[in-house]
Image (spheres, helix red, strand yellow):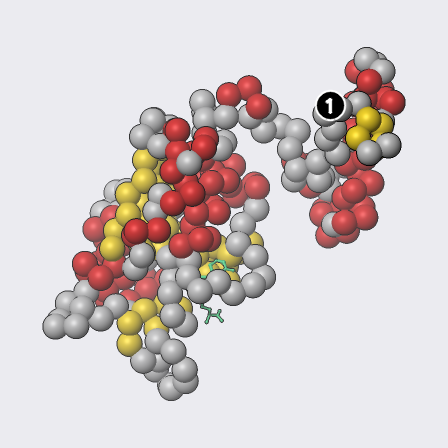
């Protein structure tokens, strides 16, 4: 079963963009499919406006609920089981847990905002789940959608091959990943830590665990506080 992504955007020419390269690009058309819908195609009137001035005044423009609703209804007609997402700095922060959940499902319908944002009634009327990729403001949702899809696609079966253990990566158990090393044995006077060349797999595993815990405590006390015991 293919993961089906439908992206609703004013800039369909941005896609697949980076998602067309490397692992995600190779898997496009097999493990996953990508459809873009041009929001202006769902606008009416001489100017095909997708936005209008904000009710109550203020700067910028707001994307119209009626135009976006037509686009969503076209992309995901009644019965479409895919979650409907809307990229938004106000959304729930994107996590590896949610990425995993999405990758186990049939796909996603992703609305990319532009301008000041989206008419609130559309979000309620179409049950959109707002997703943020971080506490900063982008000029549009497209890069956010790409970030989300990149994270999802690498987890799809067959995309990453054996490197895709997906079990010992950062954020599993709310831990950051341990440090990596490879040849040369000595780089600018710095050797690879002895334990990693000892061949003692139990000791190596214990060292990696300790390092992951140390890094998490030092760098991400928020994650450290949320880690599961054991
Ligand atoms: N006025 C809004 C920002 C709008 S930015 C505010 O202050 O909250 C325009 C669009 O970019 C948004 O509708 C959203 O789709 C996208 N966007 C901006 N920052 C984002 C983020 N951190 N995560 C996901 N999408 C974002």
Q: Percent position (x, y) of residue 60? A: 38, 78
- The answer to whether the residue bearing label 1 lies less than 8 angstroms from the nearest atom of ligand 1 is no
Q: Percent position (x, y) of residue 131? A: 48, 55
Mark 1 nearby-residue class (10 Å; few <14, some 14–19, many ≥20): few
Q: Residue at x 32, y 64 (%)?
A: 122
Q: Percent position (x, y) of residue 90? A: 51, 64
Q: Residue 209 lies in what quarter of the image?
A: top right
Residue 167 vertical position relative to residue 222 in the rendered view, above or below? above
Query: Can residue 129 be seen in this snapshot?
Result: no
Q: Is residue 84 left or right of residue 69?
A: right
Q: Residue 193 lies in what quarter of the image?
A: top right
Q: How many marks?
A: 1
Name the residue at the bottom extreme.
57
Could you tell me which quadrant the C terminus lies in? top right
Query: Can residue 68 be seen in this snapshot?
Result: yes
Name the residue at the left extreme.
46
Name the residue at the top extreme.
199
Name the residue at the front extreme.
188
Q: Is residue 214 left or right of residue 122?
A: right
Q: Which residue occupies the foreground of this view, 206 or 181?
A: 181
Q: Residue at x 19, y 60 (%)?
A: 42
- Helix, strand or loop at label 1? It is loop
Q: Percent position (x, y) of residue 221? A: 77, 51
Q: Residue at x 34, y 26 (%)?
A: 30
Q: Which residue is mark 1?
A: 183
Residue 229 vertical position relative to residue 146 in the rendered view, above or below? above
Q: Is residue 1 left or right of residue 228?
A: left
Could you tell me which quadrant the N terminus lies in? top left
Q: Which residue occupies the foreground of this view, 230 or 58?
A: 58
Residue 11 vertical position relative to residue 61 in the rendered view, above or below? above
Q: Residue at x 48, y 47 (%)?
A: 147
């Amino acid at each position: 079963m293919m993961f089906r992504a439908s992206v609703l955007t004013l800039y369909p020419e941005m896609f697949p963009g980076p998602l067309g390269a490397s692992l995600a690009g190779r898997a496009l058309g097999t493990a996953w499919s990508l459809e873009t819908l041009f929001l202006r195609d769902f606008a009416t009137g001489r100017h095909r406006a997708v936005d209008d001035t904000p009710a109550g005044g203020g700067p910028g423009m707001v994307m119209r609920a009626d135009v976006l609703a037509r686009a969503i209804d076209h992309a995901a007609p009644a019965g479409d089981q895919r979650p409907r997402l809307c990229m938004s700095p106000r959304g729930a922060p994107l996590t590896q847990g949610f990425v995993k959940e999405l990758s186990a499902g049939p796909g996603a319908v992703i609305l990319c905002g532009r301008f000041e944002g989206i008419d609130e009634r559309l979000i309620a009327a179409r049950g959109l789940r707002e997703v943020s990729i971080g506490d900063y403001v982008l000029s549009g949702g497209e890069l956010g959608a790409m970030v989300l899809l990149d994270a999802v696609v690498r987890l799809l079966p067959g995309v990453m091959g054996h490197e895709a253990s997906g079990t010992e990566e950062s954020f599993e158990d709310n831990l950051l990943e341990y440090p990596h090393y490879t040849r040369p044995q000595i780089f600018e006077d710095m050797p690879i830590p002895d334990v990693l060349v000892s061949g003692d797999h139990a000791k190596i595993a214990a060292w990696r665990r300790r390092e992951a815990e140390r890094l998490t405590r030092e760098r991400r006390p928020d994650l450290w506080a949320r880690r599961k015991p054991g």
